[in-house]
Image (spheres, rainbow, N blue to C red):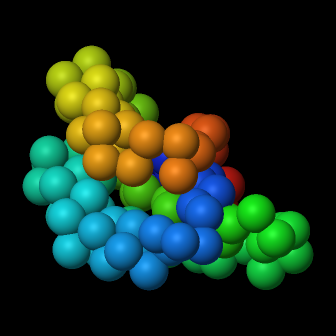
């Protein structure tokens, strides 16, 4: 299992709208690529929330090949959609992890 983790700091002024968009549009769009089985949304509780709320979204892929397919065919478009909608009001960084049994 591959976990594609996207951590995002969202300014308070748009946090509720961003979270709604994430749940109703962005995550369904990523899962509908067929590359991920599901996603989990986490709030980083020990992060400094003064400038915004920090969330981590973990997208689960059954294989490295499916993650690679997402990166090759969909990642640029998905990132552009998010950037066009939120600009610098939601800043993300990404990490890739492998589940250890």
Quadrant for residue 75, please give it: top left
| Nearer to me, 78 or 91 | 91
Quadrant for residue 47, please give it: bottom right
| Nearer to me, 45 or 62 | 45
Instruction: Judge from the rendering whether residue 45 lies leftward or rightward of residue 34; answer left or right.
Output: right
Can residue 75 be seen from the camera position used here? yes
- Residue 62 x/y as whole percent: 35, 50
Quadrant for residue 82, please give it: top left
- Residue 67 x/y as whole percent: 36, 35
In the rendered view, would you say 57 is above or below 70?
Answer: below
Q: Going 44% across and 80% down the picture, which residue do you hit? A: 16
> How many numbered tags mark residues here?
0
- Residue 74 x/y as whole percent: 22, 31
Q: Going 64% across and 77% down the picture, which residue do you hit? A: 43
- Residue 55 x/y as whole percent: 60, 67
The C terminus: image quadrant: bottom right
Taking the view exactly as shown, the residue that stands out farthest to the top is 72
Q: Going 30% across and 38% down the picture, which residue do you hit? A: 84
Q: Going 79% across and 80% down the picture, which residue do you hit? A: 45
Instruction: Judge from the rendering whether residue 2 lies leftward or rightward of residue 92; answer left or right.
Output: left
Taking the view exactly as shown, the residue that stands out farthest to the front is 13
In the rendered view, would you say 99 is above or below 80?
Answer: below
Instruction: Judge from the rendering whether residue 4 lies leftward or rightward of residue 30; answer left or right.
Output: right
Can residue 31 be seen from the camera position used here? no
């Amino acid at each position: 299992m591959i976990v594609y983790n996207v951590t995002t700091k969202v300014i308070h002024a748009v946090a509720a709208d961003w979270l709604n968009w994430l749940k109703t549009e962005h995550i369904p769009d990523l899962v509908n690529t067929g590359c991920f089985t599901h996603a989990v949304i986490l709030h980083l509780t020990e992060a400094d929330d003064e400038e915004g709320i920090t969330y981590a979204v973990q997208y689960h892929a059954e294989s490295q090949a499916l993650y690679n397919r997402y990166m090759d065919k969909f990642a640029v478009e998905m990132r552009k959609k998010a950037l066009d909608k939120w600009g610098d009001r939601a800043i993300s960084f990404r990490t890739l992890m492998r589940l250890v049994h």
